[in-house]
Amino acid sequence: MPKQVDHRERRETIARALWRVVEQRGIAHASVREVAQEAGISHGAVQHYFATREEMLVFAMDFASEQTSLRVAERVAELGDAPHPRDVLRVTLTEMLPLHPEARATSRMSAAYVLEALHDAHIHARAREGLTHGRDLVEDLVRQAITDGHIDPDRDPAIETNLLLALTGLTPLVELGVIEPREATTTIAHHLDRLFTNRP
């Protein structure tokens, strides 16, 4: 009997090949042909799963977001039952920085996706939706931490959320060697120490 193809697995293989192309050569090289070559499959096989380059990019970014969320969930689970919100935020922010190979690949994919979104209305809408959802999750954590007395009640949760997410702006400084990874994680820890009044 012929081997049955796992279509989701094949799409993920193509997505990871796209990540590698973006990471190693940049978004300008993320064509269906170059991704097919990187994945070790035919151009036609890629087009069987993704009719257009845009479809391939959207899936690759959705998959990158899923993998980031899984890494965050795994690291939060390692904190044990009822982890302190400061630690949850630390893990969340740290996993968004390019501090290890998987995070670096998804981080670069995210940066490339934003650039594409600036010139493509459909990708713009999808990217905006994803970023809005991610921001809402962080704001929910901040609001709950305020309610539980971990953060001063006079803090504005929307502003504090924006300041926390601004820390992901450390990414280009790390990528270009302006600062060391340890400096980025230390900065995150220092900011969280300032934010939380009831530290673990």
Image (tube, rainbow, N blue to C red):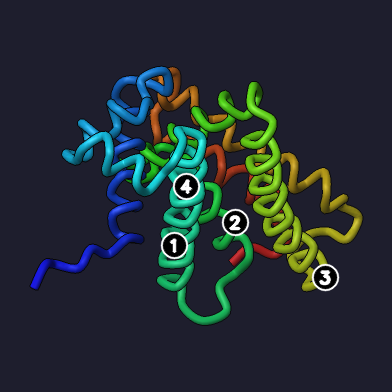
Characterize the local packing of mark 3: few (<14), some (14-19) or many (20 or more) Cα atoms within 10 angstroms: few
In this rendering, would 80 be left or right of 118?
A: left
Write down the residue under mark 4: 59
Write down the residue under mark 1: 70
Please name the amino acid that badge 1 sits on: Leu
Q: Nearer the viewer, mark 1 or mark 4?
A: 4
In this rendering, would 155 be left or right of 114?
A: right
Residue at the image point whose x is 69% and y is 31% from the top: 121
Q: Nearer the viewer, mark 3 or mark 1?
A: 1
Please name the amino acid that badge 4 sits on: Phe
Q: Nearer the viewer, mark 1 or mark 2?
A: 1
The label number, if any, that marks residue 164 in the structure image: none
Distance CA(mark 3)–CA(mark 4)? 37 Å
**Coordinates of residue 155 in the picture (x, y in percent):** 86, 52
Residue at the image point whose x is 58% and y is 67% from the top: 200
Distance CA(mark 1)–CA(mark 4)? 16 Å
Query: Regarding mark 4 in the picture, which secondary structure is present there?
Result: helix
Q: Return the residue nearer the eye: 195 or 15.
A: 15
Characterize the local packing of mark 4: few (<14), some (14-19) or many (20 or more) Cα atoms within 10 angstroms: some
Distance CA(mark 3)–CA(mark 2)? 16 Å
Write down the residue under mark 3: 147
Q: Nearer the viewer, mark 2 or mark 4?
A: 4
Choose the circle earlier in sequence order: 1 or 4.
4
Characterize the local packing of mark 1: few (<14), some (14-19) or many (20 or more) Cα atoms within 10 angstroms: few
The label number, if any, that marks residue 89 in the structure image: 2
Please name the amino acid that badge 2 sits on: Leu
**Coordinates of residue 129 in the picture (x, y in percent):** 70, 47
Choose the circle earlier in sequence order: 3 or 4.
4
